[in-house]
Image (tube, rainbow, N blue to C red):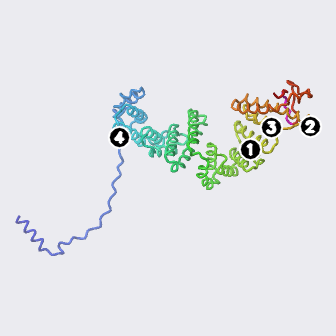
């Protein structure tokens, strides 16, 4: 105690400067902590044995036997083998199906998502099944086990990143799940998610179309089935309203009037949702046709001319579409030929030319009832007799065109049952205009049951019959 008091006295008697602190040197810059890479978990012999045990058990659907060895591997050496995740996903889903405890269910579904994160960490650089592939699986699992989440934002982002990364190699289940989820989000808030849904639909539909048309793809048929499903879902969603599409894509077309890729994608989407009478579609088609004429751009320009009443130009564009269409695409070429035939019948009134195009269309697709119906309409609208003939006789002979017309209506329903109702109505209607027994009394060549060739440009052989 005595020493302590003496020390205090000494301090008190020291000059002030003696207590001042000495100037300190500038602090040395802090050295960055060395980066220590996390060591890879050690794969022991026990890990290898457990991988073999759980892998074989899962293959045989013996999930209860697989659980413990799998859990040992997953928690001690998660980098040992990809089977930890390819089999683990199936194993955890089985475990989920067995529980009735809400708390355990939640823990297990969280584990399922963590599995995908660990797989990305240890095997995300796999060239065949990279991070994008794994994110697709994660998104699907979230959708399956987090149904209480209406928007599923995390899953939406994972699925989208997966599809953007995998493109044509995307799994069909990922594409379908993404389309379903985007559709569900659109229904919850059309204003907010409308544009995204349209873009999502377009991306998914195009990828499925590519998969379906790939002759080397063993899942091509399944891809086509899912494309049909996605197309139908979109068409019935309400987002497919043509006015809404115009509102969204009008500015995009204007800003990309020289971008062939974007214009073609927009045209394809308009075609799929049957909005090809839209001004935006016409604008895109005309732009594409100037940049690089295609079958679709020519057909789009033809429809635009039809809408404007420029019928001869429409015929010209349809002719171009026929030339640009692939040789084996008989359906589209037959459609264009039929459209030209209709223009010549209904707009230009050149019936013989119309029949020429109908015959060409039938050469490509013989079961087109519509072609025979239109041909019958051509005949029914014609009056091949009159010049150099008594008016009364010409009037009777001009009724023979209805025999030829009804023959074509009969042919229509024979080759195409889908038009049977329309054909029967036309048969009933035009049969009333056959020559009566009184009218053909003085014309032996028109006697009931006789063979007769209708004159003029028609030159069709038919069977005479009186009106009933």
Circle 1 or circle 3, nearest the eye:
3
Left or right: 282 with respect to 39?
A: right
* Position of residue 436 measured from the top left corner of the image (x, y, whole percent): 85, 29
Please tell me which residue is depicted at 70% across the width and 36% down the height of the picture.
331
Name which quarter of the figure residue 167 lies in. top right
* Front: mark 2 or 1: 2
Residue 88 is a magenta residue: no
Residue matched to label 2 = 391
Total residue callouts: 4
> In the image, which residues are magenta?
457-462
Secondary structure, mark 4, is loop
Distance Cα–Cα, label 2 vs label 4: 104 Å
What mark, if any, has residue 41 been given in the picture?
A: 4
Q: How dense is the environment of label 3, judged by Cα within 10 Å: few (below 14), some, or many (20 and up)?
A: many
3D distance between C-alphas at marks 1 and 3: 21 Å
The residue pinned by badge 1 equals 318
Q: Residues within 10 Å of mark 2 (few under 14, many from 20)?
A: few
Q: CA distance from mark 1 to mark 4?
A: 67 Å
Q: Is 278 placed above or below 176 here? A: below
């Amino acid at each position: 105690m005595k020493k302590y008091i003496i020390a205090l006295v000494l301090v008190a008697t020291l000059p002030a400067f003696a207590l001042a602190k000495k100037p300190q040197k500038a602090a040395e810059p802090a050295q960055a902590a060395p980066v220590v890479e996390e060591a890879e978990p050690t794969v022991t012999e026990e890990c290898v044995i457990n991988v073999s045990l759980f892998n074989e058990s899962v293959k045989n659907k013996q999930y209860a036997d697989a659980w413990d060895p799998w859990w040992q591997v997953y928690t001690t050496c998660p980098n040992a083998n990809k089977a930890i995740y390819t089999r683990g996903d199936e194993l955890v889903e089985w475990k989920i199906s067995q529980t009735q405890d809400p708390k355990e269910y939640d823990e297990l579904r969280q584990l399922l998502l963590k599995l995908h994160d660990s797989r990305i960490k240890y095997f995300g650089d796999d060239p065949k099944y990279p991070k994008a592939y794994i994110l697709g699986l994660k998104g699907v699992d979230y959708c399956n086990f987090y149904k209480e989440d209406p928007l599923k934002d995390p899953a939406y982002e994972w699925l989208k990143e997966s599809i953007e990364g995998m493109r044509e190699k995307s799994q069909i289940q990922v594409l379908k799940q993404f389309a379903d989820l985007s559709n569900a989000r659109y229904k919850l808030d059309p204003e907010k998610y409308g544009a995204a849904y349209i873009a999502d639909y377009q991306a998914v539909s195009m990828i499925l179309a590519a998969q379906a048309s790939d002759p080397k793809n063993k899942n091509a048929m399944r891809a086509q089935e899912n494309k049909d499903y996605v197309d139908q879902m979109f068409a019935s969603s309400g987002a497919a309203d043509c006015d809404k599409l115009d509102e969204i894509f009008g500015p995009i077309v204007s800003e990309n009037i020289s971008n062939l890729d974007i214009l073609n994608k927009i045209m394809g989407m308009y075609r799929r949702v049957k909005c090809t009478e839209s001004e935006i579609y016409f604008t895109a088609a005309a732009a594409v046709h100037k940049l690089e004429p295609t079958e679709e751009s020519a057909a789009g320009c033809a429809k635009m001319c039809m809408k404007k009443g420029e019928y001869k130009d429409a015929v010209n564009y349809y002719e171009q579409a026929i030339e640009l269409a692939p040789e084996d695409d008989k359906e589209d070429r037959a459609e264009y030929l039929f459209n030209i035939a209709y223009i010549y019948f209904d707009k230009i009134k050149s019936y013989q030319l119309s029949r020429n195009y109908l015959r060409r269309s039938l050469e490509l697709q013989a079961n087109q009832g519509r072609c025979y119906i239109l041909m019958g309409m051509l005949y029914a609208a014609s009056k091949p007799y009159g010049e150099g003939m008594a008016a009364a006789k010409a009037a009777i002979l001009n009724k023979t065109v209805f025999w030829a017309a009804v023959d074509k209506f009969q042919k229509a329903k024979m080759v195409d049952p889908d038009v049977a109702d329309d054909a029967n109505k036309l048969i009933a209607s035009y049969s009333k205009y056959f020559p009566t027994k009184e009218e053909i009394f003085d014309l032996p060549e028109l006697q009931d049951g006789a063979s007769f060739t209708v004159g003029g440009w028609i030159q069709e052989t038919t069977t005479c019959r009186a009106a009933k």
